[in-house]
Amino acid sequence: MLADRVAPAACAAVVKADGYGLGAIPVGHALIKAGCRTFFVATPGEGAALRKAIGRGATIGVLDGYLDDAVPAYRTHALAPVLSEPGQIAAWERDRPDDGRAFVHVDSGINRLGLSPADWRALAGREGIAERLGLAGVISHLACADVPEHPQNPHQLATFRAAMAALAVPLQASFANSSGIFLGRDYHFDLARPGAALYGVNPTPGRGNPMRPVVRLLGRILQVRHIDRGEAVGYGAAFIAPGPRKLATVAVGYADGLHRSASNRGHVLCQSHKAPIVGRVSMDMMTIDVSDVPDLAIRPGLAVEVIGPGHDVDAAAADAGTIGYEILTSLGRRYRRRYHRDGAFADEPGA
Ligand SMILES: *Cc1c(COP(=O)(O)O)cnc(C)c1O
């Protein structure tokens, strides 16, 4: 869907942080199948793991750049560093294998990574620089793409356009992250770089989510109990029952990425009904109030929906006072993970 939206520009995929917590390798396989040929990861280690899984047919850009403690990995795994400062550029120019490819990151106003416009102009003016660095493209990153009316968007756009104009030879330009894609054609350039939207996070906050949910997280009820008015629940006795209550203890806690900030504030879906989280979320479990869930079948073993179509990743983020990105990248390692592929679910490869 994103590729169609940006065509004729190409669409890369950002699979850093283990595919935003969902598994860079199964995600990478699915994206290759969907036609993706350029991936971005954060670190050389992530790049090496992805390369081993997907083979040689795609470009893998490493957003952290060219790191001196991982030099052999770029060569062994054909990783393309995204060069963002002069020291990295000099080191890459010296070390680069004959067929080595790289991107350059130009800062257009986020002040996080990227060459300053002045450093970029100096580099872009050097004769034959694209060949010497094996440049596959130039990227820049938006700070406020999720706020379409933010004046920094057109400002960064103008800065990036000027940066591209400084080049003597045309190179692939890449600007838009997920939300940037939805700012319109002007922001698409040659290669979009969505991450979050691929994983179902709403790239247009405050408006309807154009993406479909891709992750569903179920938690198992371990125990059901009834408490009376005045009884306290969980650590710190942070919830006091205002009346008789039916509670269920669910085996998902903050060690599984259910943020503690959702204590006494978030909810899950139990048999499609909202069940509030009561008391503090603890390491391995949380307690939910199922008093208003009209189902006698609430019993140990029943699964409740912590994230899913009825309570999506953005809603779970709002419950915890964070963003969908942090919800996904916090998902713990002890879930049984199953992937939908070719019409069926299968366990994570190797699980
Ligand atoms: C993480 C990242 C992206 C992807 O951003 P989303 O908002 O997840 O689409 C793109 N480009 C760079 C440089 C990034 O760091």
Image (cartoon, grey):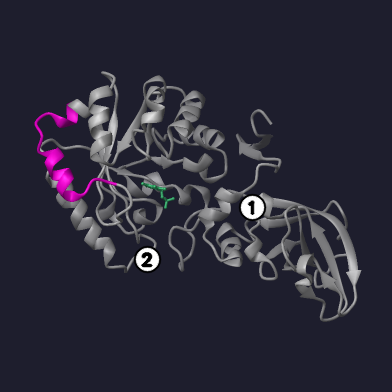
Is there any visible trace of residue 167 in the rendered image? no
Residue 222: where, in percent of width, then height? Answer: 84, 54
Q: How packed is label 2: few (under 14 Cα within 10 Å), some, or many (20 or more)?
A: some
Q: Residue at x 83, y 69 (%)?
A: 294
Q: Which residue is mark 1?
A: 257
Is there any visible trace of residue 312 in the rendered image? yes
User: Quadrant location of residue 136?
Assistant: top left
State the residue in front, 4 or 107: 107
Residue 121: where, in percent of width, then height? Answer: 13, 44
Of the 4 image quadrants, the one containing the C terminus is top right
204 on left or right of 323:
left
Q: What's drawn in magenta, residue-wise?
A: 114-131
Residue 180: where, in percent of width, then height? Answer: 34, 55
Find residue 225 and name its label: none
Q: CA distance from mark 2 to mark 1?
A: 27 Å
State the residue in front, 29 or 259: 259
State the residue in front, 74 or 268: 74
Q: Is residue 205 magenta?
A: no
Q: Is residue 304 above or below residue 234?
A: above
327 on left or right of 95:
right
Q: Which residue is mark 2?
A: 147
Residue 299: where, in percent of width, then height? Answer: 88, 57
Q: Is residue 127 magenta?
A: yes
User: Quadrant location of residue 320?
Assistant: bottom right
| Main SS of residues in magenta | helix
19 on left or right of 305:
left
Which amino acid is tagged 2? Val
Q: Is residue 304 above or below residue 231?
A: above
